[in-house]
Image: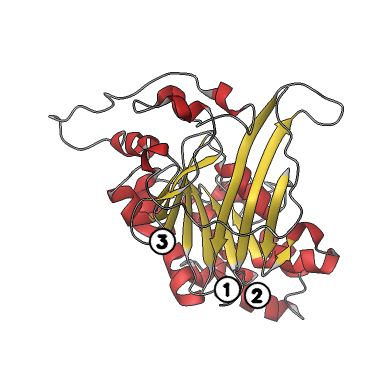
C-alpha cells in the first residue's frame, strides 16, 4: 500500500490562551483525521455551516497557520519538519484557489502578472517563449486564451473569468493537490457548473486531487468523492458523498440536509430551525458533544465526553454520535509519536 498523498493525524487548532494568557480559548478544530490517497485522484469535500472549522483546516494544510497538536504529513513527511527546499516543493505541489476571485489580484498589475510571479518563483521556464507556451497551456485547460485576458487588468474581467484564471495559475505549477476554499460561492450561478466541470477534468485527466471547502451540499453532491461534515470544529459524519447525503445518520447532518429548500410549496421548510447559541460548547477539548444544545435526541452521556466515530454504513460511512454506540468504532491512524498535551480552558 503506497503512502497517502496527504495525511492529517489527530489535528487540533486552538485560538486564545497560551503560556502567558490564561483567558478563554476557542477550539477551532479538534482531533481531525483525514487521508487523501496518491491514486486515484479524489475530490474530498469539507462541508459545514459558518464557523465549523472549514477555513481553519484549509489554512492548516496550506501552512498559513500551525496546528496546536497533531501532524500534517505530505507523502509521509511531517510538514512542520520540512526544510526550506522541501517546503518550496510542498508549496508548489499543494496549491490554493480562494473564495474571492478579485481580492487575490493586485489591481495595479495586468492579469499576466500572476503567471509571471509563479514562473519566476519556481523557475518554470528558461525563456519568455517557453513561459508563454506554459501560460497558454494552462489557460487552455480552463477554456481561455492569452490574447483575450493577459493584457487586461483584473477589474476588466468578470468574476468567473478571474476565478478560472486562478485555477489556471494553480494548474501551471502542475500540483498534486488543490485546496479550493469556496471557489464558486462568489460566482454567478451560470458559471458555477463550468468551474465545477473544470475541477472534475483536472481530477480525471490530470490526476489532481482537491480539498473542496464548501457550505453548499448540492455542489458537494455533484462532484465530491468523499465528504467530511464538520460541526463546531469536530467531524459529525464522513464517508462516500452520495451515501452520506442520501442516508444521513448524525442528527446535525439530518438537520442540515432537511434545511435545503425543496421546490414544492406544499412542503414546509425550516420547521426544525433553532437559534440556540452553542458556542459555549467549544471552549475546551474536554467538552461533550458540540451539538448537544440543538439536538432533539440528546442524552445525559453526551455531556460527559465527545462521541467517537462509529461505523454506520457501507464503506467508510461513519458518524460521531452515541446513538450508534452498538456499532463498531471507526479505525483511526496510529500515532507513533509522543502524545501531545492539548491546552484546555480554565
Q: Is residue 157 above or below residue 7?
A: above
Disc 3 element: loop
Which numbered disc covers residue 136? 1
Q: Are marks 1 and 2 in contact (CB under 8 Å)?
A: yes
Q: Examine the rendering and report whether any part of residue 109 can be seen.
A: no
Q: Are marks 3 and 2 in contact (CB under 8 Å)?
A: no
- In the rendered image, which quarter is residue 314 located in? bottom left
> Quick one: label 3 or label 2, which is nearer the N terminus?
2
- Using the image as rendered, state which of residue 258 and residue 336 is in the foreground: 336
**Looking at the picture, how far across and down is residue 128, in whole percent?**
73, 77
> Quick one: label 3 or label 1, which is nearer the N terminus?
1
User: In the visual, does 121 lie left or right of 232?
Assistant: right
Which numbered disc covers residue 225? 3
Q: Is residue 272 above or below residue 9?
A: above
Q: Is residue 169 above or below residue 266?
A: below
Residue that badge 2 annotates? 132
User: In the visual, does 49 lie left or right of 323?
Assistant: right
**Cα–Cα gap, marks 1 and 2:** 6 Å
**Looking at the picture, how far across and down is residue 297, in whole percent?**
34, 28
Which image quarter is the C terminus in? top right
**Looking at the picture, how far across and down is residue 219, in whole percent?**
38, 51
User: In the visual, does 86 lie left or right of 155?
Assistant: right
Amino acid at each position: 500500500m503506497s503512502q497517502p498523498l496527504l495525511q492529517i493525524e489527530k489535528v487540533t487548532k486552538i485560538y486564545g490562551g497560551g503560556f502567558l494568557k490564561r483567558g478563554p480559548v476557542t477550539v477551532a478544530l479538534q482531533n481531525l483525521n483525514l487521508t487523501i490517497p496518491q491514486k486515484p485522484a479524489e475530490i474530498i469535500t469539507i462541508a459545514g455551516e459558518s464557523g465549523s472549522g472549514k477555513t481553519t483546516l484549509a489554512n492548516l494544510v496550506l501552512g498559513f497557520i500551525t496546528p496546536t497538536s497533531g501532524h500534517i504529513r505530505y507523502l509521509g513527511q511531517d510538514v512542520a519538519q520540512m526544510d526550506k527546499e522541501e517546503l518550496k516543493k510542498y508549496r508548489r505541489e499543494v496549491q490554493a484557489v480562494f473564495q474571492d476571485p478579485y481580492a487575490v489580484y493586485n489591481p495595479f498589475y495586468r492579469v499576466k502578472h500572476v503567471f509571471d510571479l509563479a514562473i519566476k518563483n519556481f523557475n518554470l521556464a528558461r525563456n519568455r517563449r517557453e513561459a508563454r507556451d506554459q501560460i497558454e497551456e494552462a489557460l487552455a485547460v480552463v477554456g481561455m486564451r492569452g490574447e483575450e485576458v493577459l493584457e487586461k487588468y483584473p477589474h476588466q474581467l468578470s468574476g468567473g473569468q478571474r476565478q478560472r484564471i486562478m485555477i489556471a495559475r494553480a494548474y501551471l505549477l502542475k500540483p498534486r493537490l488543490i485546496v479550493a476554499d469556496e471557489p464558486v460561492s462568489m460566482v454567478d450561478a451560470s458559471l458555477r457548473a463550468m468551474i465545477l466541470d473544470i475541477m472534475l477534468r483536472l481530477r480525471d485527466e490530470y490526476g489532481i486531487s482537491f480539498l473542496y471547502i464548501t457550505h453548499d451540499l448540492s455542489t458537494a453532491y455533484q462532484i465530491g468523492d468523499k465528504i467530511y461534515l464538520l460541526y463546531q470544529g469536530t467531524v459529525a459524519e464522513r464517508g462516500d458523498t452520495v451515501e452520506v447525503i442520501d442516508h444521513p445518520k448524525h442528527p446535525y447532518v439530518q438537520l442540515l440536509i432537511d434545511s435545503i429548500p425543496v421546490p414544492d410549496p406544499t412542503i414546509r421548510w425550516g420547521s426544525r430551525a433553532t437559534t440556540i447559541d452553542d458556542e459555549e460548547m467549544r471552549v475546551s477539548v474536554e467538552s461533550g458533544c458540540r451539538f448537544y444544545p440543538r439536538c432533539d435526541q440528546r442524552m445525559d452521556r453526551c455531556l460527559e465526553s465527545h462521541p467517537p466515530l462509529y461505523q454506520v454504513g457501507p464503506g467508510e460511512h461513519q458518524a460521531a454520535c452515541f446513538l450508534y454506540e452498538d456499532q463498531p468504532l471507526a479505525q483511526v491512524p496510529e500515532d507513533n509519536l509522543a502524545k501531545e498535551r492539548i491546552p484546555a480552558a480554565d
